Image: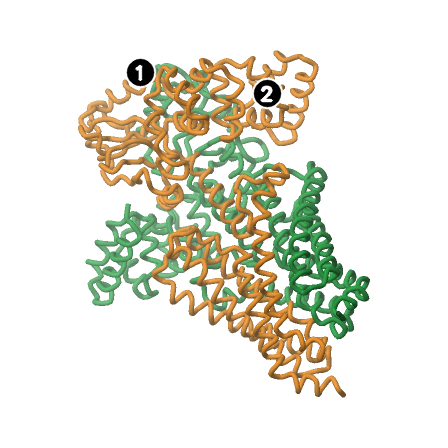
Chain colours: A orange, B green
Amino acid sequence: MTSTKKLNKITEKIHSWIANDQIPKATDRFLELHPADQAEVFNNLEDQAQAQILDHLDIASTADLFDELEDEETLEAAENLSLERLADVLDEMDPDEAADLLGDLPPEQAEEALAQMEDPDDVIPLLGYPDETAGGRMTTAYIALRPQTTAETAIQFLRDISLDNDVPYYLFVVDRNKSLIGVTGIRELVVAHPKTIMDAIMDPDVIFISADADQEEAALLMTRYDLSALPVVNENKQLIGVITHDDILDVLEDEATEDIYRLASVSDTDLEPNSTVKDQMKGRLPWLLLNSLTSLFAAWVISNFGDLFIQVAVLAFFQSVVAGLGGSAASQDVVMVVRAIALGKINTDHAWSIFFRQLWIGFLQGAIIGMMVGLGVGMWQNNPFLGLVLGLSLVGNMIVAAMVGTLIPLLLKYLNQDPALASSVLVTAATDAIGFLIYLSLASIFLPYIQHYFSF
Amino acid sequence: MTSTKKLNKITEKIHSWIANDQIPKATDRFLELHPADQAEVFNNLEDQAQAQILDHLDIASTADLFDELEDEETLEAAENLSLERLADVLDEMDPDEAADLLGDLPPEQAEEALAQMEDPDDVIPLLGYPDETAGGRMTTAYIALRPQTTAETAIQFLRDISLDNDVPYYLFVVDRNKSLIGVTGIRELVVAHPKTIMDAIMDPDVIFISADADQEEAALLMTRYDLSALPVVNENKQLIGVITHDDILDVLEDEATEDIYRLASVSDTDLEPNSTVKDQMKGRLPWLLLNSLTSLFAAWVISNFGDLFIQVAVLAFFQSVVAGLGGSAASQDVVMVVRAIALGKINTDHAWSIFFRQLWIGFLQGAIIGMMVGLGVGMWQNNPFLGLVLGLSLVGNMIVAAMVGTLIPLLLKYLNQDPALASSVLVTAATDAIGFLIYLSLASIFLPYIQHYFSF
């Protein structure tokens, strides 16, 4: 383990060694790090320094490093390697990471690399699945046994195969058709009598997932049932791979980031404050452009009440209060619904009961906020009718907020879209425009009374 | 595995059996479910039905169910049990879950239950750590061996102890002071020569965490280094517990929920759309009240320019465009910074370089949006100076948005507060008030020109 501070120091040292052309020294220190830390240091190096380090790594170390790098970083680094070397590294990489890299390479280069690999059989079955599916997250590095195998044979088998750290601690049992029929653990193997057969110690009630299911579903299953590995089957229920606990941690982080980003209208999940200006603009500007349109629409709503402001300028002060509070209340509803859906806590069957409860809460919150703000502004501006209009508008817009904040994500889920797309831009577009409409309509109705008071 | 639909059907059946007083039938079907599914069904039952089911469960099944229930649900269910039965159940529960329950019980009841437990030694060491620390998440159910122990002795030891499913597949090696000196896996044990000692097969470079560290730090370590178990040590580096992969999944989900909720100004992480009206109001209303104050402050800013609207009512149409787009841009910055901090990708050392990059992006986005909206509105209202004022205000407010959106979470982190507290309410309070100020100040300056055009 290396703390961030210590790691920063080591990175600086490695940087300066490379800058002074002391590449072997830099490489030696680099290799002492955990591959996860190597990946971080490697990322912080200039392109040329990366190439120099790569030149000094053997195949196995390169494979370990590539396993830890993010997909795009691996792709960039792979461009420094000859085709032959690349094929060797691919052979040594985790099958699922190798498949990801092959999927990212230009098609001809991928084909040539695959052709030069010694043992492409682990990787080929993984190439057909999209990244975000269970098939895209699984590895083929798992252990499958037959039901009649004895514990002692199984242990001998474990001794014989070269053990990869990423092989999970589960052993799967398959029948002659490769169909998954049970699961057991290495621990059960160890404590069993040597002559016991798998059929006797396996748990036949094995939890699995279909290869084309969404990775989020895999994460939900593994979280719900506390699994450290989840077998993946094809349409014939044949075992074709395994998703391991570390993959699921990545899925959970990715999905949470995706939700948070979408809710705040950032469309590219890979964006960080460190991302290039160009990448950030690509993921952010389109939403702001959309927001320009929605806010101009809201401005158009206001423009229909233009005369009001000439008569009672003070009305212009408070329209944003109505719109803003509606937006805040709506985003509270949105996150609760989005998160409950993401964690599998609600489905669209309960939509109506949730909807009415949230509507009631919207009314209650609106009544409390409306009363306080209405009274406060009524006294501040010495105009009870202005306060009344503001208070009633707040009640109305809070109910609207509960409606859109609850219904839009549920509707998106019902349409099989990501509920998190009910981002602030879309939901507040509704609470803004409707909020202005309610407030200015009520103001028009009460205009004579409001004016009457101001004329004192 | 049980799909949601199937589970809903089973739940309905169990419900109706209980309603018809066919409790044994209901209990039998209930027990066929995976404990995680039992927990879901149990949750959906009325209080009385829960008590009836509990009456028919044996100690072990009750413990399994309690292990799976959420903390508050376990507490509620525990109130149905006699003290004696509760002590028996606590003995059977996972030590970390039992410790959580004991911590939630009223102090006298917890003491009495602890006194009646047969084997409280697993639980007692866990009682002292706050829920959200590494110590609060760890379990004492782990296996520690001495460096001179042989593989065959270790395997015999594994056979002798009663194996709990939740014991992780790691074996830790400790010296005579109980200090952690290495780690190995059951798999390494199995493939090693029977006479090999632990010292020879263990990895001395073991990653661990201190018991008082935040659970989020534990999650970061386990994610970064792909660990399925993380040993926890006390201040003397003595091994005192282990955090397992399933706990870390819960931590990641909790932390993501907390971030999302805080960003949308919902303060209680346990809230769901199903939560009671009272609970929801408690977690939501205070933020809306705060938002009332911030939006009234923004209204006060506008009120200082009251005369403007009488002279040029059209100005009132577009103030929300400036404020709203600033708010959207700021929340984009906030989520990227908050997420990068949460995933350990930035620390406050890089604060300034991130700040200036985000500022530059704010300017660029402001320039593009400002140009388009300014041109559009200038043509719509046939008033180039209104367009100019609007465009310049958008540039200004986007720069403000980048400033507050980046600095507030970084500042919170620097002050050791949760960066996600830079919620929409606080950040948009700034972009609203400053946005209005910029727009209306510029409008005052350009007022003669704007009026000149309208007088055509």
**In this rendering, is residue B94 above or below A151?**
below
Give the letter of the chain under mark 1. A
In the rendering, at what x and y percent does residue B171 appear?
42, 28
Is residue A224 or residue B74 the one in the foreground? A224
Dot 1 alpha-carbon crowd within 10 angstroms: few under 14, some 14 to 19, many 20 or more: few
Q: Residue at x 35, y 61 (%)?
A: B80
Q: Earlier in the sequence, mark 1 or mark 2?
A: 2
Provide the secondary structure element on which disc 2 rests.
Answer: helix
Read off the residue under disc 2: A50
Q: Amino acid at mark 2?
A: Gln
Res. A91 in view: no
Read off the residue under disc 1: A160
Residue B92 falls in which quadrant of the image? top left
Quarter of the image that includes the N terminus of chain A: top right
3D distance between C-alphas at marks 1 and 2? 37 Å
Is residue B309 or residue A189 the one in the foreground? B309
Image-based side of A184 in relation to B443, left or right: left
**In this rendering, is residue A262 above or below A146?**
below
In the rendering, at what x and y percent does residue A168 appear?
36, 29
Is residue B353 or residue A202 the one in the foreground? B353
In the rendering, at what x and y percent does residue A192 appear?
25, 28
Q: Nearer the viewer, mark 1 or mark 2?
A: 2
Provide the secondary structure element on which disc 1 rests.
Answer: helix
Dot 2 alpha-carbon crowd within 10 angstroms: few under 14, some 14 to 19, many 20 or more: some
